[in-house]
């Protein structure tokens, strides 16, 4: 299975999207500055540590690879299907778990600030 064409297409579209996104964002910020409005709405406060997010994500991918290997060995699934489906399922699941952990931490921080 040759993925070169698909990979190149995704990279080109991703690059074009990134450049357009950055240019639009720059124009929005410049318009706010010209109007004298604070541009702090563009700054995102990191709710959870990035090391937690990436750690959970890597664990999810590792579990996905492991379970993909088990599926290949025990079922008649094709190798690509087993690996990719498990990697995406467990990688996504780890990001969802990180979201809920971040929400819980944010609520705890709000309670501490209100006390």
Image: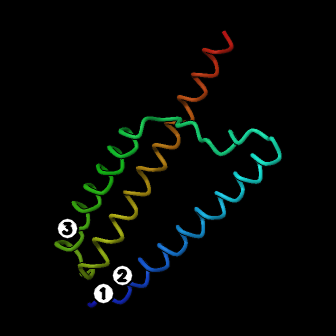
Between 24 and 66, the one nearer to me in the picture: 24
Which disc number belongs to residue 7?
Answer: 2
Quadrant, the C terminus? top right
Q: Is residue 80 left or right of residue 17?
A: left
Q: Is residue 71 left or right of residue 106?
A: left
At 45% from the left edge and 50% from the top edge, which residue is drawn? Answer: 95
Outermost left residue? 73
At 40% from the left edge and 43% from the top edge, which residue is drawn? Answer: 53
Between 113 and 84, the one nearer to me in the picture: 113
The crowding category of the residue bearing disc 3, from other C-alpha atoms within 10 Å (few below 14, some 14 to 19, many at least 20), is some
Q: Position of residue 71 (x, y in %)?
A: 24, 70
Outermost right residue? 35
Image quarter of residue 3: bottom left
Task: Please determine whether, in this image, residue 50 is positioned above or below residue 1.
Answer: above
Q: Position of residue 86 (x, y in %)?
A: 33, 65
Mark 3 — residue?
69
Mark 1 — residue?
4
Contact between labelled residues 2 and 1, with CB atoms less than 8 Å apart: yes
At 61% from the left edge and 27% from the top edge, which residue is drawn? Answer: 107
Q: Position of residue 97 (x, y in %)?
A: 46, 44
Between 71 and 97, the one nearer to me in the picture: 97
């Amino acid at each position: 299975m040759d993925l070169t064409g698909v990979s190149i297409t995704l990279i080109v579209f991703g690059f074009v999207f990134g450049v357009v996104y950055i240019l639009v964002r720059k124009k929005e910020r410049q318009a706010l500055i010209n109007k004298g409005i604070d541009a702090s709405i563009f700054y995102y406060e990191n709710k959870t540590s990035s090391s937690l997010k990436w750690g959970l994500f890597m664990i999810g991918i590792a579990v996905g690879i492991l379970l993909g290997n088990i599926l290949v060995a025990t079922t008649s699934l094709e190798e690509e299907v087993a690996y990719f489906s498990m990697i995406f399922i467990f990688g996504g699941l780890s990001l969802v778990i990180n979201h809920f952990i971040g929400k819980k931490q944010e609520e705890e921080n709000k309670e501490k600030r209100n006390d």
